[in-house]
Image (cartoon, rainbow, N blue to C red):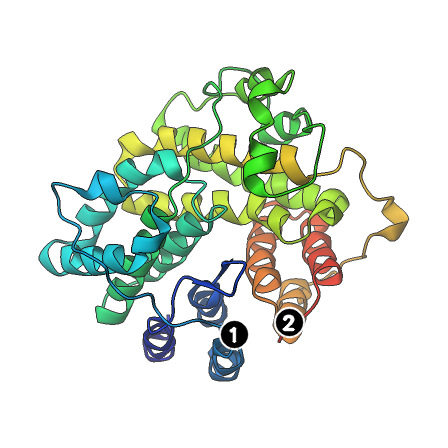
């Protein structure tokens, strides 16, 4: 990791809040720059950051201290993101980052829907940097900001039982029923799930991980399934549906920093969340194959798709392309790269 470039970008973003605008859109800047640096495109960071900063709001001010005795009262209170950032900054000064992460991952996991999964995604990106050796005040500060956003926007996972079936992630995802009214906001859509026939059975249909050692493979297969299904179904909601892949990928890459006893619960939580987003936003019918992009091939295919994502410049396209490239590298499936191109076609450039 190019620590200097990444650290400077983190420090610039830490003067901004995790959300911006009247619609409280998520600040993706720290996540996207981690991808750019890790993918060897550090020379693009400064110009991209400068353009992205123009849309962001300042970091919200503090209101009151959060303590180890009263933190539960502040959980899910978006007004206290400044308080949470101070709390985690202090915790990471006092204790090793892995210890803080393990403690709070367990506490925050039930609310992994936070910010439509952006809390866990932001944490997952900085954990990758930390595991790569970039442990310094800037990356620890970014971990504090990521955990604070997750805590402030904590939202419960829709109710469903744990995996107890025999299906692969791809087959299980294909079996998820759709809510009857795919309109409105996330809360309204998720509110239909408890009354949706077949919802709990479909979620339970995923084959469980019987040991922690099986969790990484199951998560990798879930990331691949969501990436491949985005290709034909991403038009239902091009931005939100990218998170069916990027959120489980964030969990997958955080696993090495977590105690093994948290691996299976993490799989259950992110699988249920992925299924909920898919039910709420993926259209029942996929786009015809003739309407879908043809990916490049050959040894330079991944580099070409990444370059096209960077030229597009949208933060969702950059992050999803990073995930899709990993899926292609693991599986060799060309539809993974086609899905990345599909996201670029569906999502309008904003920079």
Residue 172: x and y in percent read 62, 25
Q: Are marks 2 and 1 in contact (CB under 8 Å)?
A: yes
Relative vertical location of residue 47 with respect to residue 175 in this rendering, above or below: below
Secondary structure of residue under mark 1: loop
Secondary structure of residue under mark 2: loop
Q: Residue at x 44, y 48 (%)?
A: 250
| Quadrant that contains the C terminus | bottom right
Disc 1 designates what residue? Answer: 55
Residue 53: x and y in percent read 47, 77
Instruction: Give the left or right position of residue 161, taking residue 279 as reference.
Output: left
Q: Which mark is residue 214?
A: none
Residue 313: x and y in percent read 61, 72
The crowd level at tag 1 (other Cα within 10 Å; few <14, some 14-19, many 20+) is few
What is the quadrant of residue 180 in the picture? Answer: top right
Disc 2 designates what residue? Answer: 350
Residue 162: x and y in percent read 45, 20
Closer to the chain start, of discs 2 and 1, is: 1
Q: Residue furthest right?
A: 290
């Amino acid at each position: 990791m190019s620590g200097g470039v990444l650290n400077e970008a983190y420090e610039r973003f830490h003067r901004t809040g995790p959300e911006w605008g009247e619609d409280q859109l998520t600040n993706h800047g720290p996540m996207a720059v981690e991808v750019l640096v890790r993918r060897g495109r550090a020379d693009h960071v400064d110009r991209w950051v400068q353009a992205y900063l123009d849309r962001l709001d300042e970091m919200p001010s503090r209101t009151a201290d959060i303590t180890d005795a009263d933190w539960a009262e502040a959980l899910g209170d978006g007004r206290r993101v400044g308080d949470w950032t101070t709390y985690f900054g202090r915790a990471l000064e006092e204790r090793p980052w892995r210890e803080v992460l393990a403690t709070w991952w367990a506490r925050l996991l039930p609310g992994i829907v936070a910010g439509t999964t952006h809390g866990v995604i932001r944490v997952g990106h900085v954990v990758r940097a930390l595991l790569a050796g970039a442990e310094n005040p800037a990356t620890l500060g970014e971990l504090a900001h990521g955990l604070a956003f997750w805590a402030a926007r904590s939202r419960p996972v829709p109710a469903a039982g744990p995996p107890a079936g025999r299906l692969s992630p791809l087959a299980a995802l294909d079996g998820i029923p759709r809510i009857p009214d795919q309109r409105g906001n996330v809360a309204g859509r998720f509110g239909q799930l408890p009354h949706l026939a077949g919802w709990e059975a479909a979620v339970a249909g995923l084959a469980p991980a019987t040991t922690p050692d099986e969790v990484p493979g199951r998560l990798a297969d879930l990331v691949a399934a969501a990436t491949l299904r985005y290709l034909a179904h991403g038009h239902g909601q091009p931005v939100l549906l990218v998170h069916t892949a990027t959120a489980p990928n964030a969990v997958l890459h955080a696993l090495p920093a977590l105690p093994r006893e948290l691996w299976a619960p993490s799989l259950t939580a992110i699988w249920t969340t992925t299924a909920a987003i898919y039910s709420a936003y993926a259209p029942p019918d996929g786009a015809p194959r003739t309407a879908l992009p043809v990916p490049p091939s050959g040894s330079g295919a991944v580099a070409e798709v990444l370059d096209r994502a960077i030229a597009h410049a949208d933060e969702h396209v950059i992050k999803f392309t990073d995930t899709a490239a990993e899926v292609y590298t693991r599986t060799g499936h060309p539809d993974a790269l086609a899905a990345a191109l599909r996201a670029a076609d569906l999502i309008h450039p904003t920079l």
